[in-house]
Amino acid sequence: MRFILFLLVYPLLWCISILPFPLLYLFSDFIYLIVYYVIGYRKKTVRENLALALPNLSDEERLVIEKKSFHHLCDIFLEMIKTMTISKKEISKRFVFTNLEVYKKLEEKEKSIAMMLAHYASYEWVISMNTYVTFSAFAIYKKINNPYFDKLVRNIRSRFKASLITTKETIPVIIKNNKSKELSIYGFASDQSPILSSAYHWQKFMGIEVPVHTGAEMLAKKYDMNVVFLKVKKVKRGYYEASFEVLSENAKEVPNYEITDKFLKLVEQQIHEAPEYYLWTHKRWKHRR
């Protein structure tokens, strides 16, 4: 049944992926009307999250952000599909790294790198970074239940030299690479809510105390990795800029959770600058004190 679903959906995804960008975004406008006004996908969750995170704004101001965030969500969903056929030249034009020299200097240290980022703006097109890196690149993701779609996503990422690893695979892969001295960069999207049973640290995020992911920091400490934050900014529709900020070049010497807390502060700054580009559909504040 899952294979039949894949066979039915895949041709549609491919047809969407070859649309020129003006038509792609016209289609996104249509999808937005369906998702927001007809289906109402997670509208209640988004509204609750905005009220919790941005209590200083009026209901009318939050409603504007809500609608813009859904519009952006439809854009990045279709941009993800576009990745199936987009050329390396096109994606490098639309996703620009403003200070690659910061990252290059970290590679010169000859230590693996933990890169922390948020579900903000375009986290899908970060894979274009692999055009510029010399280290082996691994993106940590949540496995898709349908194995055929999961394989499709892996194949798409491999077009840009990125290897997807699940959260369960992360530690074994790091151990293997560490033993073989394979210098690598690992991408951690560490801003969402962890499983409560595995939460070791609570911190205020957008003014609310919540459990936070600490895996990137703890693994960086254990395996002596440099840690960098990637800030992504949406310049205009279909165009993004990303900049690097070093969080630590000696993670072992940093007090526990300090790197994680600094990361959260930087994500907060992103959100305050343009809250409509954050992934508000996730139940980020479902566990709180």
Image (tube, rainbow, N blue to C red):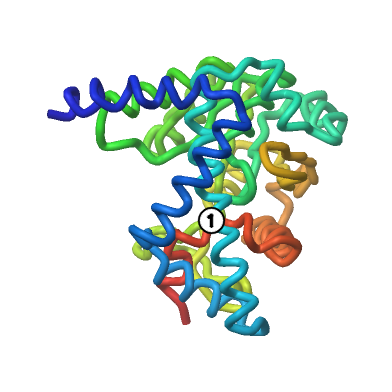
Q: Nearer the viewer, residue 20 or 279?
A: 20
Question: How many numbered circles does the render carry?
Answer: 1
Q: In this view, does 191 lie to the left or right of 40?
A: right
Binning the other alpha carbons within 10 Å of mark 1 as few (below 14), some (14 to 19) or many (20 upward) gives many
| Residue 231 visible in the picture | no
Q: Position of residue 5 (x, y in %)?
A: 21, 28
Helix, strand or loop at label 1? It is loop
Q: In which quarter of the image is residue 145?
A: top left
Task: Specify whether 206 is left or right of 45.
Answer: right
What residue is shown at x 17% (from left), y 24% (from top)?
A: 4
Above or below, 288 against 13 in this view is below
Along the viewing direction, whichever of 189 and 119 lies nearer the viewer = 119
At 67% from the left and 34% from the top, the residue drawn is: 113
Residue 96 position in % (x across, y down): 77, 32
Going 73% across and 39% down the picture, which residue do you hit? 240
Q: In which quarter of the image is residue 214?
A: bottom right
28 to 21, vertically: above or below: below
Question: Is 160 displayed left or right of 140 in the figure?
Answer: right
Q: Where is residue 43 in the image (x, y as percent from the top left)?
A: 42, 66
The residue indicated by pointer 1 is 279
Q: In x, y percent, where is residue 88? A: 66, 16
Q: Is residue 240 above or below residue 91?
A: below
Q: Which residue is drawn at 87% across and 30% down?
A: 101
Q: Nearer the viewer, residue 173 or 149?
A: 149
Q: Can residue 273 be seen in this view?
A: yes
- Compared with 281, 29 (above or below) is above
The quarter holding residue 159 reads top right
Question: Amino acid under label 1?
Answer: Leu
Quarter holding the N terminus? top left
